[in-house]
Image (cartoon, rainbow, N blue to C red):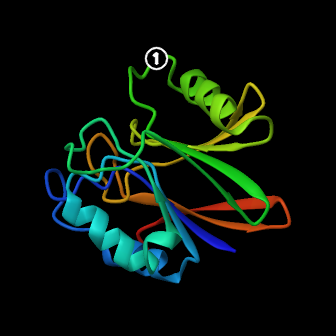
Amino acid sequence: MRVAIVSDTHVPNRARAIPAWVREELERAEHVLHAGDWDAVDTVETIRELAGGADRLTGVRGNVDPPAVDLPEVATVELGGVTFVVTHGSGPHHGYRERVANRVRAHGGTGAVGVAGHIHEYVDETVDGVRLLNPGSATGASPASEPTMMVAEVADGTLSVDRRDAY
């Protein structure tokens, strides 16, 4: 199963639109994970359409999302035998990785993979036994220096992740 992982799109307040190459990756995916800071309900609807419908999108609210972005703060989904816990990761930069790892353990248990955003940095590392994925900002919204995202392949409980950027 091909999974597109994005976060921090910030459309329209910090970026005009989702880049064409990101849109293509979202359309190609069998499921999309979005870790918040969409910025607007219209952005949620656009990404839901690109994903192929609500059942192919798992997303959460970020710290700058308006109340109309009616999504949970944490969402858990099992895809291809891998449990993903999606959260934005709000809070100070200091302690970010440990905070997200604790939230992943609390919501997904042992072996769950955390997907978070907030810091606009590409991260793929293990923290206290929890694999953390942060795709950066799909639009390159500041403080990111470029747009990035992740594309994962999941099957039979295995996960491989690749970085994507403008090509």
- 159 relative to 144, above or below: below
Q: Secondary structure at mark 1?
A: loop
Position in image of residue 65 (x %, y %): 24, 44
Residue at image coords 52%, 82%: 28
Quadrant assignment, res 102: top right
Query: Circle 1: is it few (<14), some (14-19), or many (20+) Cα within 10 Å?
Result: few
**Numbered marks: total:** 1
Q: Say left or right for 71 vs 66.
A: right
Where residue 113 sits, quadrant-wise, is top right
Above or below 82: residue 63: above
Is 39 displayed left or right of 87 in the figure? left
Residue, x 44% and y 58% (percent of image)? 148
Query: Which residue, as the protein is rendered here, is positioned at the far right?
Result: 156
| Residue type indicated by callout 1 | His
The answer to whether residue 131 is above or below residue 94 is below
Seen in the image, is 85 located left or right of residue 63?
right
Residue 11 location (% of width, % of height): 21, 58
14 up-or-down from 4: above or below: above
Quarter holding residue 43:
bottom left
Task: Classify the position of the C terminus by image quarter.
Answer: bottom left
Q: Quick check: 162 left or right of 110?
A: left
Q: Residue at x 65, y 28 (%)?
A: 106
Question: In the rendering, at what x and y percent does residue 13 appear?
Answer: 13, 51
Task: Give percent across and percent down for residue 1.
Answer: 70, 74
Q: Which is more toward the observer, 119 or 38?
A: 38
Q: Considering depth in this image, is 36 or 144 the residue closer to the camera? A: 36
State the residue at coordinates (41%, 69%).
166
Determine the residue located farthest toward the top in the rendered image.
94
Of residues 4 and 72, which is closer to you in this image? Answer: 72
From the image, tell me which residue sits under label 1: 94
